[in-house]
Amino acid sequence: MRNLNFESELQKIKLKENQHIEYKSSFNDSVIETLVAFANSKGGKVLVGVNDDGQPNTNFKYGKETFQKWLNEIKVKTQPSIIPDLEIIDYKNRQVVELSIQEFPIKPISFKGRYYKRVKNANHQLSVLEIADLSMQSLQVSWDSYPATNISSEDIDLKKADKFIQKVNTIGRFKLDGSAIESLEKLRLISNGKITNAAYLLFSKTDIPFNVHLGRFKTPSFIIDDKMLRGSLFEVVEETMNYLIAQIKVAFEITGKVTQRTEIFEYPLPALRELVLNALIHRDYLSPIDVQIKVFDKKITFFNPGKLFGDLTVEDFKSNNYQAYARNKLLSEAFYLTGDIEKYGSGFKRILNELKQYPTMQLECKEVPNGFLVELSYTKQKTTFSKKIIDKVTHKVTDKVTDKVTDKVTDNLSENQLQIMRMMRQNAYISTKELADKVKISQRKVKENIGKLKEKGLVKRIGPAKGGNWEILKV
């Protein structure tokens, strides 16, 4: 029995129930439920014999066999069985029982077939997806490391894998040699001869059954344009960025001659790319819901299925001081090796750094039903982003600049040629086949248009057909 000043103990725990403390006036099923919630979280203790106001319950009593009966009941009603530590606290002839439990190493624990987790000062019943997440966290594995159902090596596009391996070796964070299959095995994307979910998402020959739904909205109910993407992830990242760039405004800062300019996009492109990567890499692939990206006049919203992983909270993001958790470890590693992400958990910080150049832009993130929502918007306050060119609120370019740029860009160029140049600016390594697919003309027509652009001194090819890149000489 532990003797202590009960008032000082209550003061120490701030007189309130919280993420690690709960009061119960008597022992019942809700005590066991709370112990399970603590075990599935970071541990905690239940003080039995204490009223909700934090004062000892004068009617609380127990007998000789009471505590053994409690422990047996807890053991029987939990799976895997848990047995908390029990200690009697004696304060002025009043007894309070402290039941404490540490975070359980194998999760989740159930109570009568239901699963709970402690969230702030309440018990939260877990959904099926949350149960699966908690189980994989406990086993230190992720969904993307499991073998893909009904998928074999024949379903993997080795050209996509070769392109990935080449980029990994170019970035230099890891060295891969040998065949494509051997390299993927080295990265555990193929495990024991089985194609993992990660490898399927990254290199599938056919469209994967996980959509990215893009839309341009005037109002929440007035859709101007929408598009559905469902290719392999590296391709979908680029296609999504192409769509966003096509939907947002751009201003041009003239630095000398009319053809010498700096592009100023309505939103910081590195921040948009980080948000796209986050939505695709960290989404919950056990959920049937699509990633949804909506472009409005004054904001862009990003929704990805699955709430924050691990014990991360929105408050952690705002404090900019948190330990990163990867829901899909192999996907995160693949995009890290290609240089698309810098290091785990740093994406949010980089977004905030990019927004420093956009003083009226704000970022909001929150957990919503079935997922996580990020909103990038700009306020009504007027601030000059570029004093000579762009008003940060309306993003309207001065007539003088737009007239000159528009005249020079459109003179003597066809729509197909403009689109080809736009695609080359977005991706200097784009192939003629990819250009043909995006512009929706034949490869022969693409080559004819590129020849005309070269004759006009607008573009040139650097390096060979394979491994080279395009350079835009003039606009």
Image (tube, rainbow, N blue to C red):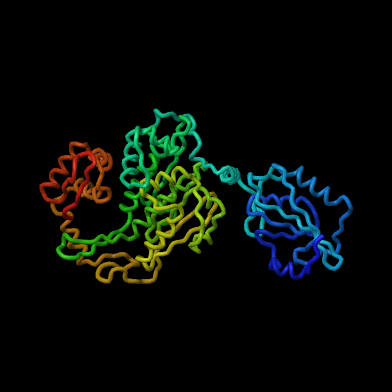
Expressed as whole percent of the image width and height from the top left, the position of residue 61 reads 87, 58
In this rendering, the count of numbered labels is 0
Image height of 419 relative to 442, above or below: below
Q: Is residue 206 visible?
A: no
Image check: 239 left or right of 318?
left
Quarter of the view holding residue 354: bottom left
Image height of 79 relative to 377, above or below: above
Residue extending furthest left? Answer: 455
Image height of 179 relative to 319, above or below: above
Image check: 384 left or right of 52?
left
Q: Residue at x 53, y 54 (%)?
A: 368
Expressed as whole percent of the image width and height from the top left, the position of residue 256 reads 16, 65
Say which quadrant the N terminus sits in. Answer: bottom right
Q: Is residue 76 visible?
A: yes
Image check: 41 left or right of 94?
left
Expressed as whole percent of the image width and height from the top left, the position of residue 64 reads 89, 52
Expressed as whole percent of the image width and height from the top left, the position of residue 37 reads 67, 51
Quarter of the view holding residue 53: bottom right
Image height of 62 relative to 239, above or below: below
The answer to which of 396 and 310 lies nearer the viewer is 310
Say which quadrant the C terminus sits in. Answer: bottom left
Image check: 247 left or right of 208?
left
Q: Residue at x 16, y 62 (%)?
A: 258
Q: Residue at x 49, y 48 (%)?
A: 326
Quarter of the view holding residue 80: top right
